Amino acid sequence: MLELPEVEVLRKDLEKEVVGKKVKDVTVQTTSVVRPYHRNRPEFIKALEGRKVEAARRRGSVIFLDLDDEMTWVIDAGANGSLHRETATESLGDDTHLAVSFTIGGAIHLSEASEEPEISTGVVPTTEALEAAGISTDALDLLDDNPTWMEFGHFLAAADKPLRLLLIDPTYIVGIGPIYSDEILWEAGLRHDHPSSTLSTQEVRRLYRATQEVILAAMKAAGSSLDEAEAEAAIDEDGEVAEHLKVYGRDGLPCLRCRRTVVRTRIKKGIYTYHCEQCMI
Ligand SMILES: [Zn+2]
């Protein structure tokens, strides 16, 4: 599952690997991945082939590769997609929906183990890229925007929502999903249903520090993601939880801070939180 930290690691890798290179060949195996942006495959292929990649940006969990013609290649790997580096001659696996090779060598493959992938990608004018990707320009990117704790405090007060729902709401905060929202709240020692507008100054500072620490630790744990597809996900295909996670996926196990059993609670339909009832208040 890709959230902000893993996507930022991916962006850095793309900056090293792809920026400055020219797109040679584009193979779209699954038309639906380009559908949100294009009428058909040839339209996408024509927009990308022969273009040079000039910059690799990220907002939330979406990657933006700026091209040399004032267009931007948007890549949203969704919750379960992955991007990895291959040699230009590597054949496409069943899970590969898109392959792009470069003139100086190498290729990247966009994969997802699903016949109906959530991955979406397309080429749009740079000035319209954020909007096209469905990203709210008002929403906070906790890494990119680098707010001060006081700015963060004002933001929390104005939002006035239960913390766990606020953290995953893309109209307020981009790139944070079920994993890191639970991790941030555990690190801060705050309950999921604590209203964001009633935090004390101390609690705002704790939450602020927790967002920074959790994101940086997760980026470190993700390492380099282009080579090892599985290293980028916090949960692997067998459902094994990555070691850097302190509370997410640990229901039934002792809390790493106070030893009380971690529980999984349903907040609302389809939304669950892993938390400790003793040390998150
Ligand atoms: Zn605890």
Image (cartoon, rainbow, N blue to C red):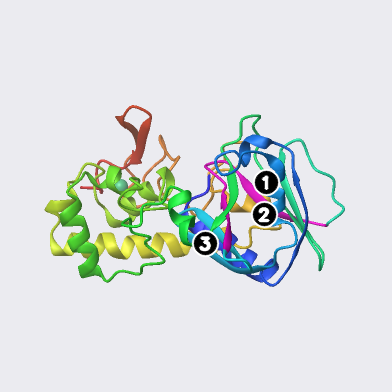
Tag 3 residue = 126
User: What's the amino acid at mark 2?
Assistant: Ala
Mark 1 near ligand 1 (CB under 8 Å)?
no
Query: Residue 259, how many percent across, how many down?
Result: 34, 46
Choose top left, top right, bottom left or bottom right for residue 60.
bottom left
Q: CA distance from mark 1 to mark 3?
A: 17 Å
Query: Against 58, is 258 above or below?
Result: above
User: What's the amino acid at mark 3?
Assistant: Thr
Choose top left, top right, bottom left or bottom right for residue 31.
top right
The range drawn in magenta is 71-87
SS label for mark 1: helix
- On screen, residue 12 versus residue 155, left or right, reads right
Q: CA distance from mark 2 to mark 1?
A: 6 Å
The one nearer the camera, 188 or 138, is 138
Q: Main secondary structure of the magenta part?
A: strand
The one nearer the camera, 18 or 265, is 18
Choose top left, top right, bottom left or bottom right for residue 12.
bottom right
Counting labels gives 3
Q: Are marks 2 and 1 in contact (CB under 8 Å)?
A: yes
Mark 2 or mark 3, earlier in chain? 2
In the image as oriented, which residue stretches furthest toward the top? 269
Tag 1 residue = 43
Query: Residue 104, how many percent across, how many down?
Result: 81, 68
Tag 2 residue = 47
Label 2, residues with CA under 10 Å away: few <14, some 14-19, many ≥20: some
Task: Give the residue displayed 79% in from the left and 61% down from the top.
Answer: 106
User: What's the amino acid at mark 1?
Assistant: Glu
